[in-house]
Image: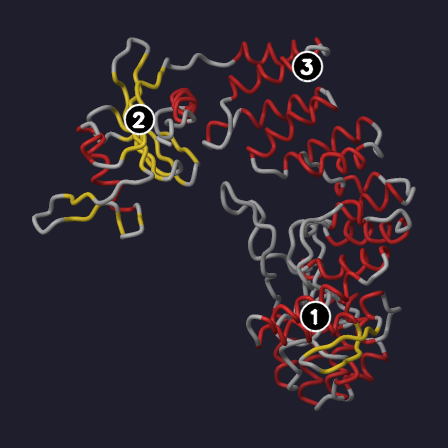
Amino acid sequence: MATPLPDHDELHLAALPLPLAERLRAALIALADEAPAQPAIAPDAYPGLKVTRAPVVASDAADTIEQVFAEAGYPEGALDLASALAPVHRALAELVANRPGLELSQFAIPSTSSGRRRWLGLAPPGAIERDVDFTVRGAARRAPLWRALIELELAAEEHDGDDEEACEAEAQRLVAALTPPDWIAVKADLLLEVYRSTGPRDGDFDPARVPADVGPWAAAMAERLTEQHAPGAPASERGGHSEPPYPLTWMVFLGLVRGGVSVEPRWDWLCPVAGGALEAASDECLGALPAARRDAAIVRGLAAMFPRDALRTGAAMLARYPSLALVDHLIARAATAHGSLLCPPRRAYLPGLAAALAAHPALVAHLDAHLATLPALPVLRMRSARYIHTVDELTPGQRTMLAVLGQGWEGDDGPLVSEGDDGTPVFGALDYVSAFEIEDGAGDSAFEALLYMDEDGAVCVTDTTNSVMYASQMSLSCNRGDELHEALHAVLRQRPPRAD
């Protein structure tokens, strides 16, 4: 027997026409028994890519609720004040305010249940709900900050040039005027698109903008994000994101650390890991964790990166946080390095790690023991590598390769190679084409290769079209085994000298 709806829901249903009320009642009851809706595309659905946001698959009950909203004429488009809703639409909004898992993306309603409660005045307002004075379309206005930003976005879309810049400048002024604690709360709401607005462009994230008095906010947001990203949690409550949008985790974790909040182990997954300009802020976050949890956080952060970034950042991290866990992770990531021209060969990368760990003999011994287990590679050397501009610079084998590959390579004037009236290839300008000759250990020519824009191409047995490797957007695939794959990767990483 289905659980009846609460009395306050029945009161809202009474505001609807009877047929719609009956359908909506049944859908709301069914929704309570359904598994939370999940993204339509998994984060790792495509090799070499990471899906960070995907649409949510709607259930039958969710589809019915959307149909009721449409049939009741619920407003679409930009979000307006809840006070502008007609009574029947207010009733619909309140019926879904406490029901997570409903995306309702086509309608003018906040994207999450918590945002709907704040919008409707059923939960305490935050900084983004406070009224501000602003100018739009030449008129002075006063409205909640979120609505002001939306009105400025709409006005900017209607105009070009100076008018668009003026709207952007006014939006930036509103956000810049916030106190640091209010700014961080508003920025979080904009990143999560609670009101379906991302706000104005504000440049690169500056860790210095995270103040020391946001500990309570950071703890509450850490808990909220942990709940939203728990296995099985409704994906619509996090906007279909597979991970919090950048730089939210930085804001939260720095807020915890600077606010003197003890970091709960369940929040460790939020700890940001980075090098470069954010290295000092990353160290500040990692310093708040005990060693074992810190090492796990570093490995977790590297695992979320693409291989090139993980190898580069991991090497820098290892110098500051030497550990067996991190060494083993980098060994595993280096084992896949030959899949991309962006990554260094592992037989050069891993000895470099060992050299940097001279003060840690146990870790060096661990790396040396691993290197000793690697299989021998075929000996290959670069005989010649050059950027070419005419077909006359190619060997006969490379010319045959180009006749095939060049038909798929686009230059300013179309394909680099087209087919003439008699079926023979017609070669155009060959800028950005690199040609390689590769010899074996005996000094004999073994392979020839062509790349376009240093990222797409093929490797063939010399003077044949027998392909052994393909390159596509820097990713490499080989049909002759891992040893040849790794050896060719090391050779093709050598870029030809530039003429200039």
> Which residue has dot 2 on it?
436
The CA distance from mark 3 to mark 2 is 36 Å
Tell me the residue that label 3 is attached to.
357
Q: Residue at x 55, y 33 (%)?
A: 308
Residue 385 screen position, x and y as percent: 33, 25
Which quadrant of the figure has residue 284? top right
Callout 2 crowding tier (Cα within 10 Å): few <14, some 14–19, many ≥20: many
The residue at 20%/40% (across/down) is: 403
Give the residue displayed 68% in from the left and 63% down from the top: 200
- The image quarter containing residue 191 is bottom right
Which colour style is shown?
secondary structure
- Which of the image's four quarters has the N terminus? bottom right
Distance Cα–Cα, label 3 vs label 1: 59 Å
Task: Give whichever of 7, 303 is nearer the camera.
Answer: 303
Q: Is disc 2 placed on a helix, strand or loop?
A: strand
Residue carrying label 1: 30
Tell me which amino acid carries mark 3: Leu
**Which of the two marks, 3 or 1, is nearer to us in this view?**
3
Q: Is residue 431 left or right of residue 330?
A: left
* Residue 435 in picture, x, y percent from top left: 30, 30
60 or 380, which is in the foreground?
380
Q: Secondary structure at mark 1?
A: helix
